[in-house]
Image: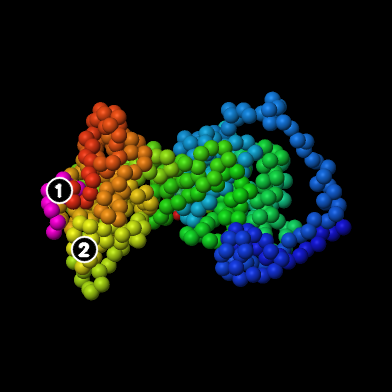
Amino acid sequence: MPSKVKTVWYCTSCGNETSKWMGRCPACGEWNTMKEGLSREKSASSRDKSLVNVSEPVPLSLKEISVTEDSRISVGSPEVERILGGGIVPGSMILLGGEPGIGKSTLALQIPLRCKTLRTLYVSGEESPKQIKLRAMRLLRQEDGEMEDNCTVLGETMVDNIIRHARELSPDLMVVDSIQTIYSDNIESAASSVTQIRECAAALLRFAKESNIPVILIGHITKDGSIAGPKVLEHIVDVVLQFEGDTRHSHRILRSIKNRFGSTDEIAIFEMTGSGLREVENPSEILTPLHGESLSGVAVGSMVDGSRPFLIEIQALVSTAAYGVPQRSATGYDSRRLNMLLAVLEKRAGFKLSAKDVFLNVAGGMRVSDTACDLAVVVAVLSSNFDLPVSPGICFAAEVGLSGEIRPVGRIEARISEAARLGYRQIYISSYNLSDDMRRSTARAGISIVEVADIAALCRRLFKADND
Ligand code: TYD
Ligand code: MG
């Protein structure tokens, strides 16, 4: 009996399905996200077939359920392995998302190039095998094209053909670049529609689970993450890795958003170089000032992203407003938070900033959302305002409250150790952050801790000045 095709409406934001069009998705509440798609009802015979291969329930305590951890597949990059929780789990499906041009294909191709023994099937619907070869030669800095890897390239976009080839080759790993370019001819809607993406991903997931071959699925996400596709897949895949960063800068952050086999608290930083992505094991070194002499308007803050603390340079420029309304602009920092900190400086500490333009920039194209950087932002603004530099050996880790008080932040010990490791002489923190035990233990770390309670105390200590 042929299967029946019926029209349904999908939400491009959350993937919710309804039988009629609606202006607002009842599941996620987004407006104007419902798109038409086709769904094929399963015929009675295929429903019966699905009952043939049923699995039996087993007790959790059963010894036969294998839990061997050592079977994880190595990917040749310690940072990527750390993010994955120790390598790729066989039979798992990993979604690698990010904006176009961020480096997803490069990261995926570096896996077989680094692990020469890993038999990889690289399926590309975006680039031809020739383009992939050229990229691989660039990554290996090779001119002659002689390579000793175990990578097979397939330029194919139909999901059934991809799975057929994968069954024949039975590789150790399959990469599909990208989910938006592949389609299934069981469905009438166009490639990259939500229906196609869901159907193809579901077919690949079934393949991964049956064959125990892990699949890395690449998916494009636009800046606001709104474009349908990868977002609707997040709940079916095992691991979601997201590549972030400004494509104009060379630094990229790989973040795990979901991981069924590890922590989601990890990030890895990469640098895009002329020969591919380089792992940055020590992010603080590239994000903090390289210049020896001190400049005004620069302060180093401590930020925690994932589970790692690192130090980041914050730059501010305060100048007299050229036109009536002063400008406030922030790059890599929340501009509302900047306005709040400026208001605190104005109201609680009496600095006249309301007639000044304030520009703030976070070095290295990074985005800061950790409130522990508040103090560094305040210091950068004040330093530029007074035109007095902060000594390069000083860094800051505290939140600034609405009444101008300097508040404690989490993971203070890790932040202090990171600053000490990088050779900072002094770290400014809140007076309420350390217990007596901690004071004694951190005194040994070779860094002196300056505790400040409010902005006035900070200024006296740092700039030896009272208010303007
Ligand atoms: P790519 O992996 O194609 O991005 P995606 O698959 O996410 O769309 O990488 C695109 C950018 O990376 C491209 O603009 C050029 C740059 N790049 C380098 O700078 N060095 C390199 O060695 C490679 C391969 C790419
Ligand atoms: Mg690509």
Residue 246 occupies which quadrant of the picture?
A: bottom left
Range shown magenta: 458-468
Its colouring scheme is rainbow
| Residue 401, label in figure | none
Whether 218 is among the magenta residues is: no
Q: Residue furthest bottom?
A: 324
Residue drawn at the location 55% of the way across and 42% of the way down: 259
The image quadrant where one finds the C terminus is: bottom left
Indicate the amino acid at tag 2: Leu
| In the image: residue 464, left or right of residue 97 | left
Indicate the amino acid at tag 1: Arg
> Can you identify the residue that label 2 sits on?
353
> Which of the pair 141/223 is nearer the observer?
223
Residue drawn at the location 80% of the way across and 46% of the way down: 50
> Which of the pair 43/263 is nearer the observer?
263
Secondary structure beneath dot 2 equals loop
Residue 186 visible in rendering:
yes
The residues bearing labels 1 and 2 have C-alpha atoms spaced at a distance of 19 Å
Please state the horizontal and vertical placement of residue 232, each as a whole percent of the image: 60, 55
Q: Earlier in the sequence, mark 1 or mark 2?
A: 2
Whether 461 is among the magenta residues is: yes
Q: Residue furthest top?
A: 63
Residue drawn at the location 13% of the way across and 53% of the way down: 466
Label 1 crowding class (10 Å Cα cut-off): few <14, some 14-19, many 20+?
A: few
> Can you identify the residue that label 1 sits on?
460
| In the image: residue 308, left or right of residue 15 | left
| In the image: residue 192, left or right of residue 387 | right
